[in-house]
Amino acid sequence: MPYLRSPGPDHPVRSTSILLAVVAMAALAACGDSDAPAAVDTVPTVPPPTAPAPTPVPPTTASNEAGFGAPAAAPGEFGELPGTEIAGTAELAPNGCWYVSANGDSGLLVAPPGTLLGDDGAGLVTADGTVIVDGAPVDATGGLVALDQLPGGADGRWGNYATFCDPTFGAVVVADTLVAAFDPAAADLEGLAAELDASVFDTDYGCGFGFTTGDAVGRWALRIDALTGEAPAAGPVTLPDERFDVSVTVGAHLFSNHCDDAMEWFEPAPTPAARWQVTSGQFTYPETSGQICAGEPPATTTLVGAVVDTTAGPVELEPIEITNTSFGCFAG
């Protein structure tokens, strides 16, 4: 087998090797030069990831900044309202206007101060948290304001709102309270019976030949109704007595339209939840000659020892004085 030997001095491979060695030494010398820049490793720049946009959190109650918002009055904007009782159904029109409708008529609703739109814009939320939805029966107190009496006139905020909604309805229902209507079917009769005592009867209501008392808001009523067509004979009465029907009623609006046969479209009807009979007690029917619908002097009696047969059992009342300032007067 032949072997390789080192080439001679004149061999071309040797000359090439020398040339390569010189180039290598020059490169090493260059690396040792302090003025030469140092080699830098290049790292590609990667942009930071983009953070996702935060998910918006819906408010618990929508603000009034979009459009007109809830049709709510500013505090004191309509002055002092007369406290008229108003009942009907809350109605939301397709154009966003709210009404109170009853007995074939309606009025544009101005809600109490602090009322906002609900989350979906299809309900009203009053300042105390009461939620009013389209089609809900409602009770309100406040007043009815004619279109030409709206604050700011025809060019004011409410004038423009009324014109946008419907200028033909004729009146604006301005509410200072607005609640869901009393539901007699849902009343806690045993709980109401526990509240019954003589102190709830602090407001008298005159009319007819009997005696009627209750509270100022029409939640409680106690009636001594004469069953005859004229004033019974004066003298002591012990219950039961066939000449009289004596009872206690609990509910809502019990004195609405009391002794009045002209009922406005917005007036609530009496809504009793329970009527309990007074099964025993005594009173004196007063001498009433010369007092028929005169008012002076008023007819007065005192019911004593009254026992009311309630859902929760009998309740005995302390003595209750009742005055009829319109004795012998009747609706008509």
Image (cartoon, rainbow, N blue to C red):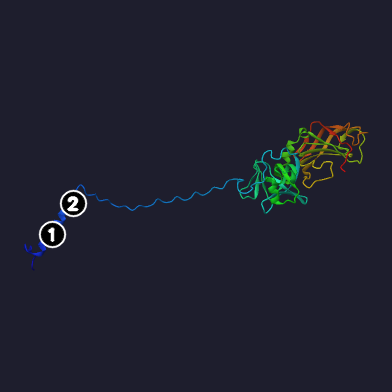
Q: Which residue corresponds to the image point at 13% horizontal and 56% vertical from the top-left? A: 22
**Please, what secondary structure does the residue beneath circle 1 have?**
helix
- Which residue position is annotated with label 2? 30
**Please, what secondary structure does the residue beneath circle 2 have?**
helix
Name the residue nearer the viewer: 270 or 88.
88
Crowding near the residue tagged with mark 1, few <14, some 14–19, many ≥20 C-alpha atoms within 10 Å: few
Q: CA distance from mark 2 to mark 1?
A: 17 Å
Task: Give x and y (percent) for residue 86.
Answer: 75, 44
Name the residue nearer the viewer: 134 or 316.
134
Amino acid of disc 1: Leu
- Which residue position is annotated with label 1? 19
Image quadrant in which the N terminus is located: bottom left
Task: Give x and y (percent) for residue 37.
Answer: 24, 49
In this view, 25 is above or below 10: above
Image quadrant in which the C terminus is located: top right
Q: Which residue corresponds to the image point at 18% horizontal and 54% vertical from the top-left? A: 27
Name the residue nearer the viewer: 63 or 197.
63
Hey, which quadrant is residue 116 in on the image?
top right
